[in-house]
Image (cartoon, helix red, strand yellow):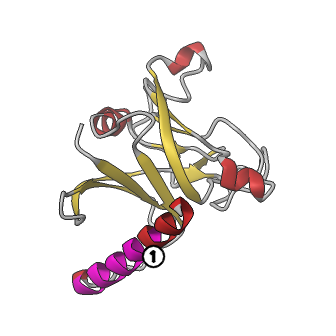
Amino acid sequence: PLKTILLMETSAKRLFVYQIMKSGDLRLIETFYSSIGLLGDNKSKEGDQKTPIGVYRLIKEIKNPKKIRSDGLYGRLAITLDYPNAHDKNFGRTGHGIWIHGVPDDVHVRSPKASDGCLALSNNDIEKLKKYVNYGKTHILIVSKVSWIEKEEWKTKNKMISNLFEKNLNNVKK
């Protein structure tokens, strides 16, 4: 698959798929509607019905989630995230089973806040999404609100951050 990164803006209920270009630029290639947790975002504990905020790896595909939940709530396909990751555990966040998944066959899409914390896409959209995923390597950034900036400002900030990482990496190697 293409080298991609996913960006979920929970306030807009939109999942963006960006291709990472060799130049480091991002190119928008798909946008999907997604339902989020019944009680919004910023998950902190098991069962709070919130979608987590953070950066997560997409781990594996579950081709027939009906084997896990026979009522078909997860649709025809699910993609697992590594929630809670080390950062979440460090902050005492608990829970498990945060996925990007489909919807029951008799539902086209779910209402904006209708999951226990997962991201729920239409079954057709999750089928499209999976072609951009390289399991274990593709990441999703989940945020409440995106602050869009001009391309030149992005390039300046991106270069500054890259230089900081490179400097820190060189200090660690010494």
Residue drawn at the location 53% of the way across and 29% of the way down: 74
In the rendered image, the vertical position of residue 92 relative to residue 138, given as above or below: below
Q: Main secondary structure of the magenta part?
A: helix
> Can residue 85 be seen?
yes
Instruction: Please give left or right for residue 43 compared with residue 27 in the image.
Output: right
Question: What type is the residue that disc 1 sits on?
Answer: Leu
Indicate the quadrant where residue 26 lies: bottom left
Element type at mark 1:
helix
Name the residue furthest top: 67
In the rendered image, residue 154 lying in the magenta stretch gets the answer yes
> Can residue 113 be seen?
no
Name the residue furthest front: 174
Instruction: Please give left or right for residue 164 compared with residue 73 in the image.
Output: left
In the rendered image, the vertical position of residue 77 relative to residue 111, given as above or below: above
Q: Which residues are magenta?
A: 152-165
Residue drawn at the location 43% of the way across and 23% of the way down: 76
In the rendered image, the vertical position of residue 57 relative to residue 161, given as above or below: above
Q: In this orientation, which residue lies closer to the viewer: 111 or 144?
A: 144
Please name the residue that numbered disc 1 is placed on.
164
Q: Looking at the picture, how far across and down is residue 18, in whole percent?
A: 28, 56
Local crowd size for mark 1, using a 10 Å CA cut-off: few (<14), some (14–19), many (≥20) = few
In the rendered image, residue 167 lying in the magenta stretch gets the answer no
